[in-house]
Image: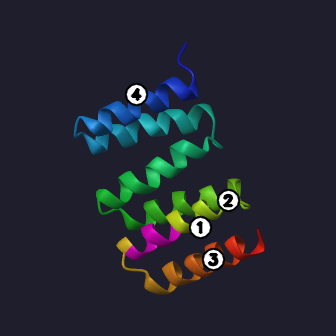
Amino acid sequence: MSTPSSLYDEAVKIYESGDVEQAVEKLKEVLAADENYVLAHSASAVYYQKLGKFDEAIEHAKKVTELEPEDNFSYLQLSVICQRCGRIAEAEDALAKAHSMGQKK
């Protein structure tokens, strides 16, 4: 039986071969097996953004921040995804959150 980790690895290989849509489908399998698999949400954010599916991209990037609220990289990724999706105000908010977290350490 495939594990979320092995399915995730398959998704990355599919993505690297150039089939972004199929990689997204494989990530859906990962999330069906483990809805809190952070790497799958992170990759989904990037892949959906590349497909021009901005709402889905931002949804997955936000989920990463919910699952790892103390990880400032989560907010940096959210900022980049929002910026690339044309949501500048949201990008700035996420970047400010990342910077404020970095200063607390």
Observer-side mark, 2 or 4, equals: 2
Residue 88 in the image, given as x and y percentages of width and height: 44, 84
Q: Which residue is situated farthest in the right direction here?
A: 104
Q: In the rendered structure, which amino acid carries the disc numbered 1? A: Tyr
Q: Which residues fall within the magenta stretch?
A: 78-83
Observer-side mark, 3 or 1, equals: 3
Q: Which residue is mark 2?
A: 71
Task: Choose the circle earlier in sequence order: 2 or 4.
Answer: 4
Is residue 97 shown in magenta?
no
- Element under disc 3: helix
Q: In the rendered structure, which amino acid carries the disc numbered 2? A: Asp
Q: Which residue is situated farthest in the bottom direction here?
A: 89
Q: Residue at x 44, y 69 (%)?
A: 80
Q: Which residue is mark 4?
A: 10
* Predominant SS of the magenta segment: helix
Task: Choose the circle earlier in sequence order: 2 or 3.
Answer: 2
